[in-house]
Every structure is written in C-alpha cells, then in structure tokens.
Image (cartoon, grey):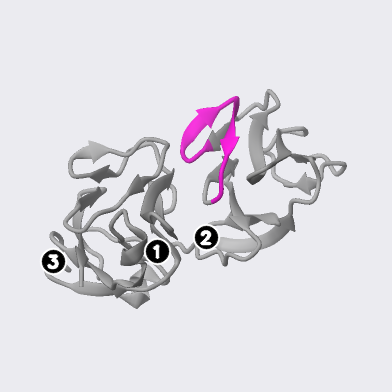
Amino acid sequence: MAKLVITLDGKVLKEVVLSKDRTTLGRRPYNDVVIDNLAVSGEHAVLLREAGDDGESFTIQDLGSTNGTYLNGASIKASPFREGDTVDIGKYSLRLLSDSRQSSFGPSRFGSNSTFGPSRFGNSGFGEAQNRAEDAGQTFKIKVLSGDAAGREIMLSKEQTTFGQRGVLVVSVTRKPRGYELVQVEGEKRAQVNGVSLGLMPVVLRSGDVINLTGVQLQFLAA
C-alpha cells in the first residue's frame, strides 16, 4: 500500500499510509493530514485514489489554497501523483512511495565550495541501467566533471536516491525494471541531461549521459 512521507528541511516528520480513496490535507484539525503552518490553507489540497487492473493510482488536487500546491516544483491545480513524486505545501514536502520502499531524502548539497562524499551527500547519488532488463545487475558509477571534486568517482548501488540543495534544486533517481529514472522533485531551475532540461516525466539514464545540476557536471557511467 502506498504512503506519504512528510519532510521538513530534509527531516522525516511522519509517514501516512494512504488507505482512503480521499485524503484531505490542510491546516484545520479535521483534515486527514494536518499541517499546522500558517503558509498552509485550512483546506489546502486533496489526494484522490483510484483502484484499477494495474493497481492503485493517485491524483493531487489543489483546493483553491492561498499559497498554491507544487508538484515536482511546478504549480498545479490537479495532476496525476505517481510514486517518487513530491508535493510541496508551504515549507513541507510530501513524497509518494510504495510501502515497500524506504525514503532517502536528505538535505545534501554540493557546489563550488563543497566536497563530494558521504559527509555531504548522505544517501545521494546516481544510478544507471541500459533500457534492458539484463542490465539490472550491472554496476554503475558517477564521475564528477567540474567543481572542487572533479575527477572523483562514486560507485552506485542504492535502489532510490535523492540529491541536490533544498529550496534550490532536488532530483530523485529510482531503479526501475527498464533502468534508472531521473526526475526533478524540487526547484524552479531545471536540471539538464546532455544539455536538455528535465520535464515532468522521468528520463531513463544511459551510460555516458552528462547531468548538469546548478552548474556542477556529473557523468553517468558503467563501472
């Protein structure tokens, strides 16, 4: 069963199992998910669940809130809400995950004055698989092409990772049967893959892809 992972400044505050067909979010105490913050409207948004042959699907709908509802960094009125997507309401982030997945959202960041490693990235990183199921067992790495950490290489093994700078740009990488999918979950500026800005749909990474994240270039490679 799917769940919402609610975070503030990169810290997990609560996990809510989505067992109802209609889950309301807002500041008023009668909501299913209460977010007690003045930036959140009394009745801010609603999450609608539909069951189908392929499993359950979700739609997030803004209820005319004052400050708006943002899905993966873009303002929305109503939109499909898929696993791995993040909704921002005020300063809070709500991420949709299946109950079998573990969230790995941290305040990790990097830039011209940053170091690249576990002390800065936490659980962050990139993963890659070619668009074939037989590549699922292959090992991949990311190579830093620019910045103070240029030349560093990190082996990738996690199923799902996020990285970036909270409030600026955050992306998520999830290992799927067809490969590793990259999607931006926060930020007005868009990350780029091979010079092309990310849209709202996930991009399957391939060995050799170059990712630009707020000026830092990373290359995705088979190990």
- Residue that badge 1 annotates: 108
Magenta segment boundaries in residue numbering: 71-83
Sooner in the amino-acid sequence: mark 3 or mark 1: 1
In the rendered structure, find residue 122 and report the number of the disc placed on it: none
Q: Quadrant of the C terminus?
A: bottom left
Give the crowd class for mark 2: few <14, some 14-19, many >=20 residues within 10 Å.
some
Q: Amino acid at mark 1?
A: Ser
Q: Nearer the viewer, residue 92 or 176?
A: 176
Is 202 left or right of 3, judged from the image as shown? left
Is 30 left or right of 171, judged from the image as shown? right
Q: Position of residue 50 (x, y in %)?
A: 72, 38
Q: Quadrant of residue 208?
A: bottom left
Q: Quadrant of residue 157?
A: bottom left
Q: CA–CA distance between discs 3 and 2?
A: 26 Å
**Residue at the image position 54 percent from the left and 35 percent from the top:** 70
Q: Position of residue 189 (x, y in %)?
A: 33, 38
Q: Position of residue 96 (x, y in %)?
A: 60, 51
Give yes or no for contact between labels 2 and 1 (Cβ–Cβ under 8 Å).
Answer: yes
**Residue at the image position 60 percent from the left and 30 percent from the top:** 67
**Residue at the image position 67 percent from the left and 27 percent from the top:** 65
- Residue that badge 2 annotates: 10
Q: Quadrant of the N terminus?
A: bottom right
Is 24 left or right of 204, judged from the image as shown? right
Is 95 left or right of 22, judged from the image as shown? left
